[in-house]
Amino acid sequence: MKSRQRAFMLMTIPALILFFIFHTYPALQGIYYSFTDYKGYGEWNFVGLKNYFNVFQDERALQAYGFTFKFAIIATILVNIFSLVIAIGLNSKIKFSKTLRAVYFLPNILSILIVGYIFNFIFTFFIPDIAQALGINALAENILGKPDAAWIGIIVVSVWQGVAFNTILYLAGLVTIPEELYEAASIDGAGTWKKFWSITFPLIAPFFTINMVLAMKNFLMVFDHIMAMTGGGPGTSTESISLLIFRGGFEGGEFAYQSANAVIYFLVIVIISVVQLRYLQRREVEL
């Protein structure tokens, strides 16, 4: 028995070492440099908490935080609404349900950068040409070039791609609900909405919690969609925190400062995830 446990331990050690080398050590190194004035090269000095205080006085960073939170909240809500509706439809007794499941999952396996560049072309040329032909002035220009509307294009693409994964999780929850519950509810005269609110939603509540937490975390770390579609522009109107940290840290000589920004943002994401989990899990009990 002991030799078996020792064998299992030996199997986990390589993964633990690799995780420490490529994840934990760089993270600890970044935290260390966040207390210095290191530019990514040359000599450096300790500056204490100066970088952390400067982040809260940086208007560009605060604007990026505002944009990222707005983007993440809207995208999370839309993704969960659409994916739940699609999952309910795919879980019903319709023709070609298995084929449709594969079709709806396709966006999840496509490269985010490639999808972003394709939609960049669609928003720049395809939609304006059609809108001009139909006389729709609101879409006659590339919305990605408008500071007030560029975020909408990013939301559309992010939601389109994010729905695929969440739909699969909702489907996994829906198939666990016994059909007898719906038959009993029908005998009692329950309508479609009553069945959903009293049977479906309470029984998939754990999947709803997982989807909300994962979606919010992923959208808070949005980077690839913005890089492929707007590059953070026009100006800095669609610049997310991840993009700001990447540009400032690796292209702007602000390695230490953006390391402090990354530490703050990491703590923000952890706090939001914990609050989400506690609130939604409490709702599961109430339901």
Image (cartoon, grey):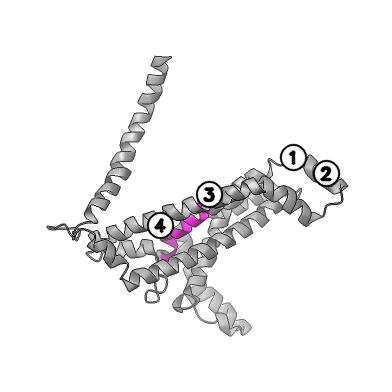
User: Does 236 appear above or below 247?
Assistant: below
The image quarter in which residue 2 lies: top left
Q: Indicate yes or no whether the magenta region holds residue 218.
A: yes
Residue denoted by label 4: 268
Label 2 vs 4, first from the N-terminus = 2
User: Which amino acid is tagged 3?
Assistant: Arg
Residue at 24 percent across and 49 percent down: it is: 29
Lower position in the chain sequence, tag 1 or tag 2:
1
- Residue 109 % position (x, y): 51, 51
Viewer-side residue, 163 vs 284: 284
* Foreground: disc 4 or disc 1: 4
Q: Residues within 10 Å of mark 2 (few under 14, many from 20)?
A: few
Location of mark 3 (residue):
278
Q: Indicate which disc, 3 or 2, sits on the residue closer to the N terminus.
A: 2
Please determine whether, in this image, residue 252 is positioned above or below residue 174. Answer: below
Label located before the other in sequence (3 or 1):
1
Quadrant of the frame with the N terminus: top left
Q: Where is residue 21? Give x, y as percent.
A: 28, 40
**CA distance for labels 2 and 4:** 45 Å
Horizontal arrangement in the rendering, residue 68 relative to residue 204 (left or right): left
Disc 3: CA contacts within 10 A as few (<14), some (14-19) or many (>=20): few
Q: Nearer the viewer, residue 116 or 287?
A: 287
Q: Which residue is mark 1?
A: 178
User: Which mark, by number, is residue 183?
Assistant: 2
Badge 4 marks a residue whose secondary structure is: helix
Left-right relation of 193 to 108: right
Could you tell me if residue 165 is visible in this image? no
- Magenta part of the protein: which range? 213-226
Q: Position of residue 209 (x, y in %)?
A: 57, 50
